[in-house]
């Protein structure tokens, strides 16, 4: 008796991608249209997986170039542009044999995918840390210096300490570790992408919590950026404790 199509679907859907091709071969002579479609979708899944393997290998170009270094750390930040909330930096040392797929610039990923990758990064990284600089410090230092401070603090938390930094487009002052600045590095280096993801996930979570304290500004949705609802609330009720005074002067008509 032929195997039920529903059972074949379950088997294909639950099969490990590395073993899927072998499984599909067992159904290659099954001419039932439902099975044919399942086999076709299985091969498309394999094709997408192989393309992702190729993409990730390209994103390891800098990690391979500097493979003589023991602990390569990716650095990135999130939250330079918002009107409210801290700026956060992430620092991640991935293992040499890192096998995490779908790493990318956090802005290119859905919130669900970022959460999934965050869990994998925190599980598999040699070390992964974040650091924040508060809105008050941003006003005091300026956003660039505040970003550098957050990056230095994130690096200082790592154990072991890195011997090479791969940075997204910047050179961090006051750091005695070799640095390589990579333009659009969060899309070109798995280490920087990982730093981008953990900082984005953690800062977003912070802004969701702030939304509970200051619901008028819609922080859970806009994460502190200048959405129409956020700006409307600013003009109507003024700033709250986590607003960056130096960022909102123009909105409030101040000099």
Image (cartoon, rainbow, N blue to C red):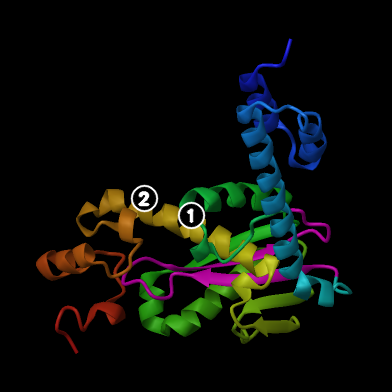
Residue 185 lies in what quarter of the image?
bottom right
Rounded to the nearest angstrom, the CA distance separating label 1 from label 2 is 20 Å
21 on left or right of 133:
right
23 on left or right of 201:
right
Q: Which residues are magenta?
A: 70-99
Name which residue lies at 22% across and 64% down.
230
* Residue labelled with disc 1: 110
90 on left or right of 87:
right
Residue 92: say if magenta: yes
Choose the circle earlier in sequence order: 1 or 2: 1
Q: Residue 235 appears at what percent x and percent y?
A: 13, 70
Residue 193: say if magenta: no
Query: Front-most of 80 and 19?
Result: 19
* Label of residue 209 in the image: 2
* Label of residue 102 in the image: none
Residue 160 lies in what quarter of the image?
bottom right
Name which residue lies at 37% across and 56% down.
207
Image height of 164 relative to 131, above or below:
below
Q: Residue 91 appears at what percent x and percent y?
A: 64, 66
Q: In which quadrant will I find the C terminus?
A: bottom left
Name the element at disc 1. loop
As drawn, which residue projects farthest toward the right?
68
Closer mark to the observer between disc 1 and disc 2: 1
């Amino acid at each position: 008796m032929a195997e039920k199509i529903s059972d074949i679907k379950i088997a294909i859907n639950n099969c490990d991608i590395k073993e899927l091709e072998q499984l599909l071969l067992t159904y290659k002579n099954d001419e039932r249209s439902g099975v044919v479609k399942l086999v076709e979708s299985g091969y498309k899944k394999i094709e997408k997986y192989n393309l992702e393997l190729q993409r990730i290998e390209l994103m390891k170009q800098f990690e391979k170039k500097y493979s003589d270094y023991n602990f390569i750390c990716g650095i990135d930040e999130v939250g330079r542009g918002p009107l409210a909330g801290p700026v956060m930096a992430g620092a991640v040392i991935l293992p040499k044999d890192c096998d995490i797929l779908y790493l990318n610039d956090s802005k290119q990923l859905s919130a669900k995918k970022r959460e999934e990758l965050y869990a994998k990064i925190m599980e598999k990284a040699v070390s992964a840390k974040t650091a924040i600089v508060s809105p008050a410090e941003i006003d005091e230092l300026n956003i660039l210096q505040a970003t550098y401070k957050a990056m230095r603090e994130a690096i200082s938390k790592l154990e072991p300490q890195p011997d090479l930094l791969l940075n997204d487009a910047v050179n961090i002052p006051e750091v005695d570790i070799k640095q390589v600045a990579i333009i659009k590095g969060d899309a070109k280096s798995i280490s920087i992408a990982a730093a981008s993801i953990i900082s984005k996930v953690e800062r977003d979570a912070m802004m969701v919590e702030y939304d509970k304290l200051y619901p008028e500004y819609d922080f859970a949705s806009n994460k502190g950026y200048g959405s129409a609802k956020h700006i409307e609330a600013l003009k109507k009720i003024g700033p709250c404790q986590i607003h960056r005074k130096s960022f909102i002067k123009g909105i409030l008509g101040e000099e």
